[in-house]
Amino acid sequence: MSDLIDLPARPFPAVMDPTRTALVVIDMQRDFLEPGGFGELLGNDVGLLRTTIEPTRSVLDAARAAGLLVIHTREGHRPDLTDCPQSKLERGGKRFIGTDGPMGRILVRGESGHDIIDELAPLPGEPVIDKPGKGAFYATDLELILRDRSIRTLLVCGVTTEVCVHTTVREANDRGFECVVLEDCVGSYFPEFQRVGLAMFEAQGAIFAWVSSSTAVCRSLG
Ligand code: C5J
């Protein structure tokens, strides 16, 4: 039996077993966090997402030191774009995915922009899930990897709060995983979406997630 942790969280503490907890870091890719990528081409200020880097780095360090399973995800597509639906390619009447940018072809696997930012680079042995959709469970082997390790709880960091983080947490919750979203480690290009996105997780008695912070996780794991 391992020791359970009462992680300070909203709307009430989240009980987690560290041996059955994974840290999932969603889409901390250059294409979302650095100038010239997909996020900026869509008209967004990437600076709003970059505040998540330092706290996520602290959580990564704490999770690695505590021996938690650490999983990274990347949103992107095959070079021939056969896994990118036309509807996604031409959303909003503009086409960015697959076109050339300063960091290579936008959201295409193997290109520099598609990769995870240096500050949060995966260590050898940490699974990296390449996902064609917004949710990390859709068309990936994430669930298989989590079930194989008997994981129950996911600590969730990443971008963007209202898109890939929300979609992934909803998918995880429906599969029976308990999700704790770390509020300073998830980011949105829209402050209003960040505020409401976080409120939605914890509403109605943690309807599909708890909300905690990097400090709470680092203290609890430490
Ligand atoms: C978006 C993501 N926002 N990772 N992707 O298109 O949230």
Image: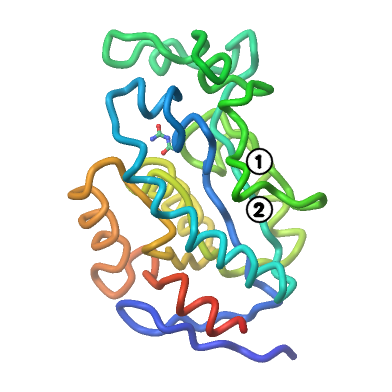
x then y, percent, for residue 201: 32, 62
Give the residue pinned by disc 1. Answer: 129
Q: Nearer the viewer, residue 131 or 170?
A: 131
Quadrant assignment for the N terminus: bottom right
Q: Are marks 2 and 1 in contact (CB under 8 Å)?
A: yes
Q: Is residue 9 above or below residue 154?
A: below
Q: Measured from the top left, where is residue 162 in percent x and y? A: 32, 46
Earlier residue among tags 2 and 1: 2
Assess disc 2: are there few (<14), some (14-19) or many (≥20) residues with their C-alpha within 10 Å of its C-alpha.
Answer: many
Q: Quadrant of residue 129?
A: top right
* Spot occupied by residue 163 in the image (x, y as percentages of width and height): 36, 41
Vertical order, 190 against 149 (above or below): above
Whereabouts is ligand 1, in terms of quadrant?
Answer: top left
The x, y position of residue 109, in whole percent, is: 64, 23
User: Which residue is tagged 2?
Assistant: 71
The amino acid type, in three-letter code, at marker 1 is Ile
SS for dot 1: strand
Q: Which of the labelled discs sits on residue 217, or is there none?
A: none
Outermost residue on the left side: it is 192
Question: Which residue is drawn at the image coordinates 70% and 76% (left, top)?
Answer: 66
